Image (cartoon, helix red, strand yellow):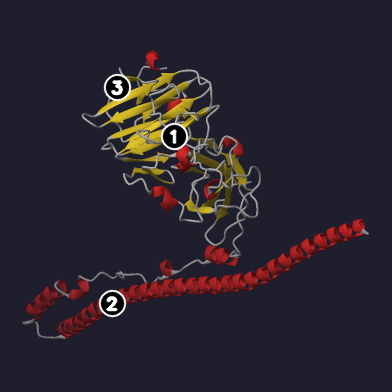
Amino acid sequence: MGENKESLRKIITTLALKNEEIQNFVCSLKQSLQNLEANSTRVQEDLESEFTSLHSVLNELKDGMLTRVKQERASRTYELQNQLGACTKALESSEELLEVANQTICSAEEDGFAKAAKDIKDSVTMAPAFRLSLKAKVSDNMNHMMVDFTQEREMLLAIKFLPVPATPEILVSECQVCDNTVMVTWSLPEADSKIDHYVLEHRRTNHEGPPRAREDYPWMVLEGIRETEHTLTGLRFDTRYINFRVKACNKAVAGEFSEPVTLETHAFTFKLDAGSSHQNLRVEDLTVEWDSSGGKVQDMRKDKNRTNSPMHSPARCAMMSPKRTPSARVGRDRFTAESYTVLGDSMIDAGQQYWEVSFDKESKAFAVGVALRSLGRFDQLGKSNASWCLHLNNWLQQSLTAKHNNKARTLECPIPDRIGVYCNYEEGTLSFYNAKTKFLIHTFRTKFQQPVVPAFMVWNGSFSVHTGLQVPSIIQSGQKRNSGTSSSNASLT
């Protein structure tokens, strides 16, 4: 009986899931019908608008050409009429002179004949008829104003619906991910001269493989791309992967999106472990401020939708790194006394990691480095063998020192606004850089016996941490900028 009930429950569950799937599909079909109606109406309106525009262009062209024909006719008519008038007057004058000459030659009076003949000869010499050009000034041919619409007619008859662009393919082997930039390259199955631009979409994800139907992050859209590649810069790699897809567009229509691809983003991402920080430090996400009142702990507990525990932070629910462990420092075991310290929540036990920190150079004291998880609650960074740091002192005079195991080395270099921290765990290298210029400030060389975590200290000041950064190529390739203060100090290791 029990087995039958359990079997029936499974059947009911399967049926319910199938019914839900069918219902969702029915809703999808209804939505598709609505979209079809709206899209067909839009296309019809666009088509009518295009033909109306084409008719307007043809009518405007027709009016302009007819005006030119009328102007040409008027100009030639004027020239011919002027020439006709001049010829008519010359002809009338010539006929009068001819009549006088005939009368003179028929006259019988010999005394006045010589003088009359001379007058007629002089008049003939000056007659307008002998100064006229008997060639028309303009032609009556208007063939030069004729138009051959053969090609245009063929073009109009060739008008048809613009073909949908082919679907591009993202060339994964040619895509590059480095220096917190991603260069995405794609191609079309065949050349298409009608392509106007491309639309590229990308979405952060923590899942390998094809994009899922439901993701924590939305698609980000980049439009108007003219080439078959695009580089995204200034990214923060706070997820393990990024999905990409692209579609081609011509003047009227867009094609289908390419098959999405997933590119892995290698970067070190962590949060600050506010549960272990000194009570005089006010920790908000990746920003820390000195708070002399030390009462920020109660304020942080008021927000029920937010917690500073590294195990329950909403930003990390999607991807819980095995290196990210709950802090043992809670309650009375947090940093205290003059150890104004806060640690990162992610361990470094392999590989090359990089992060940056911006700090207020007016802080009375500030330090950045790495520490063992076992760092004592009273320990100050750099004053035990469990931590390595770069320390800024602004108490009496400004100085920058490298500290480890209570030993310090003063560094003679300009103090940057932002420091880059590079840790190569296997090689035991901890280096500090000017984050902007990649100038090497100092390098510790040691052998890490245990995993380490990012560590920070501030007194009467503030700082902000920048994570999700890849190791810059100039650092990873060993092309460091050297100076007299950039060598390692064996006494500090």
Residue found at x 43% / y 39%: 277
The reply to whether callout 1 and callout 2 are in contact (CB within 8 Å) is: no
| Earlier residue among tags 1 and 2 | 2
Q: Is residue 189 above or below residue 480?
A: below
Identify the residue at horizontal 51%, vertical 40% (top origin).
183
Residue 355 is tagged as 1
Marks 1 and 3 close (CB-CB < 8 Å): no
Q: Which residue is mark 2?
A: 78
User: Label 1 to label 2, Cα distance in Å?
Assistant: 87 Å
Where disc 3 sits, the SS reads loop
Q: Quadrant of residue 488?
A: top left
Is residue 232 depicted above or below 199 in this figure?
A: above
Give the quadrant of the C terminus.
top left
Q: Nearer the viewer, mark 1 or mark 2?
A: 1
Quadrant of residue 321 within the rendered picture: top right
The answer to which of 279 and 367 lies nearer the viewer is 279
Q: Is residue 134 left or right of residue 193?
A: left
| Residue 310: x %, y % from top left | 52, 43
Residue on which the image places disc 3: 411
Neighbourhood count class around disc 3 (C-alpha, 10 Å): few under 14, some 14–19, many 20 upward: some
Residue 73 can be seen, yes or no: yes
Assign the N terminus to one quadrant of the image.
bottom right
SS for tag 2?
A: helix
Q: Amino acid at mark 2?
A: Tyr
Number of numbered discs on residues: 3
Q: Earlier in the sequence, mark 1 or mark 3?
A: 1
- Residue 341 placement: quadrant: top left
- For the residue pair 487 and 82, the one nearer the viewer reads as 487
Instruction: Look at label 3 and name its amino acid.
Output: Leu
Q: CA distance from mark 2 to mark 3?
A: 96 Å
Establish if 126 lies above or below 460. below
